[in-house]
Structure formats: structure tokens, C-alpha cells
Image (cartoon, grey):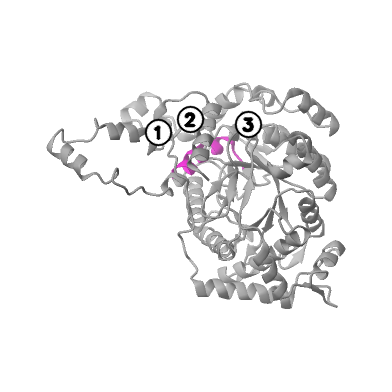
Amino acid sequence: MSDSNIANRQRRGRRARGAEPAASAAPVLAPVGGRLQLLDAVALQRIHETALVLLARTGIAEAPPAVVELATGAGAALGEDGRLRFPESLVERVLAGLPRQIGLHGRGDEGPLVLGGDEVHVGTGGASPEILDLASGQYRPSMLADIHLAARLVDGLEHVHFFSRPMVARDIEPPLRMEVNTAWACLAGTAKHVMVSASSVEAVDEIAELVYMLAGSEAAFRAAPFLSLNVNHIVPPLRFDADSAAVLLRAVARGIPVMVNTFGQLGASSPVTIAGCVAQTTAETLAGMVLAFLVDPDVPAIFGPRPMVTDLRTGAMSGGGGEQAKLTAAAIQMARFYGLPSSTIAGATDSKWPDAQAGHEKCLAVTLAVQAGAHFITQAAGTQASLMGTSLEAYVIDNDMLGAILSAHTAIEVSDDTLDAGAIHDAATGAGHFLGEATTLARMNSDFLYPAIGDRRSIGEWQDAGRPDIWRRAHERVRESLAAPPRQLVDPALAARIESRFALTPLPSALSQTLTTDEVSHVG
């Protein structure tokens, strides 16, 4: 991404939040990853070879007829045991032909999020069934209005680059209606790139028609796709999910970018060793990439390994430990081994509240994913309770965290300007400090990222202000942001036509429509 695109995104983020002092400006260098190497070249090659063996010898079970027809027509074989096997030659041919760079667009004046190379993008995600209620401070079932308000909130958070559907709309029962309404709730709330899910080809078709209307035409959407689909085509170990595999094929045919995701749980549905888990996950993800490529060789498909750690004491998923961060980094190294655009999960804290546990677990996981070189990191903001809960306050807190992580991963400028021995001499022999230097004042705005809600006041100032903690400051920021009039992202006449065409559920226009009290209990 160019420096100008980074700067445009930051300016748009500041406009969405309202006027702020110039000192809050963020650095304009793009964050880069790919420096962490937990696996050496020999290990990467061995994992790759194991994945090829799994695809060719073991194969994938329960392939639906459309997948069988597509794959066998390209050289795969369906065995008498019902398992679809992918020969090494087919997989290697697909790997050689897959696109190495993909642009995921928004609907503003910023450039696309470019997946490929070393640039890193972070955002939301998940399918939480619960939300931490702003009014009560207690978890409750998530609803469509919550998804829309989350999208509106994230639209103004400059370090959250995209909005992946974070919650399930539990107030809408039929899956088809829920998924189409969810897509609209996201798109009506943010101009950033949106990711949603679909559980049927019918849902894919309706979502496709919706985004074509919003874009102005199918051709316009295909040229600059502002929505993509999360597709979990596999049920580990090594079985297709028939409905999701069909969704994958239809989404590619409709020109919708796809996250080809695989969720195995280490020690449960995947081997207990990190190497074995990554090998199986790689094989399962490659199977989906092969299918996507066979539908369209120019497919905007993103390699999405998402292996998760199991707490072997309980059998439940545990996303907050160091093992999870290491597992994610290793899986992403395989994506870089192939040179493919990649996405993964990082930030699935086990904490139920946006507290110190959540902070250190999220920061560790996201940092390692960035350092490993993931291009697109979902669940990096807002999720709690091992992806089972969402907190709006956490979005604001995590925005500060993500800004710091990304700032720490920008390049260090080494030049005549930054290595000015003469300026050091003049300050050392003159004023004895650099505070009044013109360069110091200029770089105050360009080289430093100032937290939006992080507290840098003195102890006395903080105590005089009532000793507010970061959760309270985030809560106030959420209320302030969502009480403001929303941005008009869609022409009202077009929005009315879309809502009528798809019989969509009305969305809230103000925060007060979803709350019953003005005070909240801080129970964390």
C-alpha cells in the first residue's frame, strides 16, 4: 500500500471521529510482517510434503457431487471408499497458477487493502452469540442491531482496517434471512471492506444481488469488490462440509472474494503436535484453494489457516495462550512458503471482560501473527470469551492496541536526516536538549502515534479526574460515537430500494433505540 493510501485512511478515520489535534496524527509508513521464522526451510518443506501426501493418499471425505465432478475433471480421483484424492501434480499446478496479490476494496476514497507482499491488515471477526450489553454490563444474546452498531463504531476506528461480521443476529431465525440482513447491517454501517458468511448457495445469490445493486452493476462490484465471504469448506479431520463447499463454488462464480478457511482444534480434530496440526490444516486449506482455482483461475481466494488450541483439561477451545500464538504463526508461515495472500485469526482471548488478561493475550497473538506475515488478521478487535462474546468497549481499547502494534512494525528510517551528527553536536553544545528543535516539532506529528484513550496523565491528574480506568473511558467513547448521527453511506433512495427488494429488517438510527438505561454497571 502506498504512503498516500495509508495517509488517506488515517485522515478518513480522524474525520469519522471528529476534529482532533494535529498531534494525534499517526505515522504514515505501512506496517510490514514476515520477519518471524519459527519454521526453517527444511521444516516448511517437510510440512508441505506431508500435506501433499495427505491429499493424495488419504484424501477428503464426503465430497458433494459438484465438487467431485469439478475435481475429477481436473485429475483428482474418487476412491471406492468415497474419499476424493488430489494428486501432487494437480496441487502443484494450482499453486503455480493462483494469484499472488489480491485487492479488497472499501466504498470510500481509500485505496484497496492489498493482500500479498509484506503489508498487514487487521480487523474484526467472529460469530459470537453473545454481546456485553452497554446498559447492564452483562452478556446477552446478540441481535442484528448490535451488528449494525458495531459496524458504525468500527467505521471510525482508524487502526481497524476492515469489518468482518463479529456476531450472530439471534433475533432473525431463518438462516437465509439472517445472512442477507447481516450483510446489509454491515454495509449500511461502514464503508470499510466487509466480510460475512453464507450457509447456502441461495444466500450467496441474494448477497451477490445486494452488492451488485449497491455497486451499481455486477461489473462494478467485480472490479472493486467491497465484500468477501468467509467459507469454512472443511470439517476436520479431512471431510468436506457439503453446504460450505457448494457456497465456495458459487461465491467464486459470482465474483465474490473468498476466505478459504480451515478450523481444526489441536488435540481434538487435528493432531496434538503443532507440526502435525499445521500439516493437516495446510492440506485441508489447499483442497479449498484447488476447488476455487478450478472454478476461476483468477479467483480472489485467500489462504486461511485457522488452527485453534484445545484446552485438553476441558476439551474447549482456548485462544489466549502462547501455544495459540505460536500455532497461528506457524500456519501463516506455510502461506508465505507458498507466496499466497493469507488470513488468520489472532486475538481470541479467553477473558470475558476487556481487562489485563484480554490485553496481554490479544497483544501476544496479534503481534506474532503480524511478525509471521499474515496479510489479513481477523478477530483482532472486539472479541472476548474464546470468540463466544463481543464487547463494543473492547473495539475502542483494541484500536489503541492495534495502532501500537502496527506502529511498532513500520520500518525505521535511516538517512542523512535521521542521522544528523551536526544537529546532535549543536544541541549537545548549545541548549542541551532537542525539545525546541524544528525537526522535533515536525516529527512530533509524523513519527509518533498517540493513544486515543490510553491514559498518559500524571498520577495526580488521574486521581483528580476520579481515577477512570480504560474500560470506563472506552465505554464513554462508545456512547459518544454511537449517539452521534450516523454517516450516510448509501443514497437514501437506493437504500430504500435495497430494503424493499430483500425485505430487510429496519436498522437502528441511534444508540438510544437499543438501550433502556443511561447508566451501566462496571462489573469487570
> Mark 2 Cα within 10 Å, few/some/many (few <14, many 20+)?
some
x 75%, y 34%: residue? 214
Q: x and y percent of residue 326 in the render?
A: 51, 61
| Residue in the foreground of this view, choosing between 252 and 68 | 252
| Residue in the foreground of this view, choosing between 208 and 522 | 208
The earlier-in-sequence mark between 3 and 1 is 3
The numbered disc on residue 455 is: 1
Quadrant for residue 155, please give it: top right
| 77 lies above or below 508 | below
Provide the secondary structure element on which disc 3 rests.
helix
Query: Of helix, strand and loop, which mostly describes the magenta segment?
Result: helix
Write the start and end of the magenta stretch as one range: 390-404
Compared across the picture, whether 511 is left or right of 396 comes to right
| 56 lies above or below 359 | below
Q: Is residue 136 magenta?
A: no
> Mark 3 Cα within 10 Å, few/some/many (few <14, many 20+)?
many
Q: Which residue is mark 3?
A: 152
Compared across the picture, whether 517 is left or right of 19 comes to right
> Mark 1 Cα within 10 Å, few/some/many (few <14, many 20+)?
few
Q: Which kind of residue does numbered mark 1 sit on?
A: Asp
Q: Which residue is mark 2?
A: 473
Q: Which is closer to the viewer, label 3 or label 1?
A: 3
The earlier-in-sequence mark between 2 and 3 is 3
x 63%, y 75%: residue? 50
Task: Tell me if residue 173 can be seen.
Answer: no
The earlier-in-sequence mark between 1 and 2 is 1
Q: Which kind of residue does numbered mark 2 sit on?
A: Arg
Determine whether label 1 and label 2 are within 8 Å by CB: yes
